[in-house]
Structures are given as C-alpha cells and as structure tokens.
Image (spheres, rainbow, N blue to C red):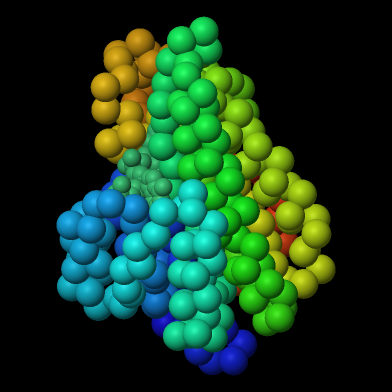
Amino acid sequence: MTTTSADTIETALVTGASRGIGRAISKDLAGSGRFVYLNYHSNKEAAQQTLDHIKEQGGNGALIQFDVTDRQAAEDAVKKIISEKGTIEILVNNAGIREDRLMVRMKEENWQRVLDTNLSSFFNVSRLVVKNMLSRQYGRIINIASASGQVGQAGQVNYSASKAGLIGATMALAKEIAKRNITVNAVSPGFIETEMVEGISLEKITQAIPAGRLGKPEEVAATVLFLCSRQAAYITGQVIGINGGIC
Ligand code: NAP
C-alpha cells in the first residue's frame, strides 16, 4: 500500500477518468493503493464502470462529477475532496477534447471550447490543489499533453495550441514549486487507441509511426504511475513522449 510520510493513504484526483487514458491511469493508481477521485463530465455510466472495476480489483475511489471548464465547479470539487481527505497528493489533468478542422473553417466556438477544456482546465483544477500541496510540502502533478502540442498537427490549430500551452504551464509551475517537493510533469502521447481517435483515418498515420502501431492507454498510464511515485522526486518540468517514435 502507498503511504505518505504521515502514513495515510494517498489521495489522487484524475480528471476525465471515465474513459480512455484517464480510466487506465485511475486503475493503475487505485491498484497501487491510492484512493482515486474519478472525475467525469457527462458519461456517468462509463465512470461508474471504471469505479466498479477498481473495487473488484480491491482498490478504492469515488466519482466526482464536474465540468473542468467551469472554474467554480472545479474549485468546489477540490474543496470537497480536501474536506473529505485533508489532502490531495496526486493530480492528473487528463480531461480533453478535440474539434478538428482546418483553420480557415474553424469557428470561434471550436477554438474556445478546446482551449477551455484542454488548457484553462489546468488553471481551474490545479490552483487550489497546488495551495494544498504547498501546505503539505508534497505533491505530484501530471498533465496529459500531446505530440500535437510539440510538433503541431494540421487540422488541429486549436488542439495543438492548447497542448503547447499546457506544456508551457507545466514547465513554469514546476519551477515555481520545485523546492517544496512538488513535481509537475507532462506526459505527451502520440496516437492512442481510445474513443478520441475514432473517426480519424488511421491507416496513413499508422504507417508514419516508427513503432507501426497505435499506443494503448495502459502504456500511458504506466509512465504516469511512475511519475506519481516517490522515486520520481527528481523529475520535474519534463515532457515525456509516449508516441512510438513519432517525434
Ligand atoms: P477520451 O477517450 O475521449 O476521454 C475523454 C475524457 O475527458 C472523458 O473521461 C470525458 O468525460 C472527459 N472530459 C471531456 N470534457 C470534459 C469536461 N469538460 N469536464 C470533465 N471531463 C471532461 O479521450 P482520451 O483519448 O482518453 O484522452 C485523454 C487525454 O489524453 C486528453 O487530454 C487528450 O487530449 C490526451 N491525448 C489523447 C491522445 C489519443 O490519441 N487518444 C493523444 C494525445 C493526447 P465524459 O466521459 O464524461 O465525457
């Protein structure tokens, strides 16, 4: 079982934990003894399935519904967790969407929704969590970025901008709080088999991936799990690609 220096079970909050990568991360964190708050937006059924699976495997957690674009709702949720558990040791900012189209056809709402969900969410959810971590002098924050934020992807001006912004925020926050035993890192997946890539023509993309295949959510989760560990104390402000060699 994973314990803090105070011998309590660590508390984790994973946004977008109902499906895909967030689900895999939540399962791994719960499987390693953490109590995991599984955030979701609208898919309660999927979130409940994730929690049921965690409990079947002997883990523990709870659902916490909120929209990461709603700062008040996010801060209320963080306050609720802190009032229940006293502390949040691990925050995984994973919730994200894409609304792809060429820039010339992009509507303002496509731009705004993606920036709000993938980037402003970082601020909405993390601010109070960081305050709590500072008071405890310990924490692990992992932001799920994307290869698109590192190299740009045609049709994803909004998404690439949001993930590049998230990488910048990761590096800046890491520098602000490194001395307090709080690490902040970004994991940057390439193409991963989740509902997010449904509808994308994957044949050409797969040919361009040196590994010759898409990644699995579990392959992202394994790195996140390590970054959440005590052993990862000296890794901060980094962007770790999980992309089959695509960049
Ligand atoms: P997914 O299967 O589409 O799942 C998205 C998750 O985000 C769901 O749990 C969804 O909740 C949640 N979510 C969306 N909008 C939200 C909001 N406003 N408030 C709270 N939760 C919200 O996506 P995924 O592939 O697992 O992606 C997870 C993260 O990895 C994203 O940040 C994505 O950008 C990043 N990523 C994915 C890939 C890939 O190839 N799949 C590659 C690079 C980076 P509901 O179920 O309630 O809707």
Q: Nearer the viewer, residue 138 or 125?
A: 125
Question: In x, y percent, where is residue 181?
Answer: 73, 71
Q: Quadrant of the C terminus?
A: top right
Visible residue check, residue 170 = yes
Question: In x, y percent, where is residue 83?
Answer: 50, 85
Counting labels gives: 0
Question: In x, y percent, where is residue 33?
Answer: 39, 77
Residue at 62% x, 68% y: name it.
Answer: 128
Residue at 52% x, 76% y: name it.
Answer: 79
113 on left or right of 19? right
Residue 39: quadrant of the picture: bottom left
Residue 145: quadrant of the picture: top right
Q: Quadrant of the N terminus?
A: bottom left
41 on left or right of 228? left
Q: Quadrant of ligand 1?
A: top left
Q: Is residue 57 above or below residue 20?
A: below
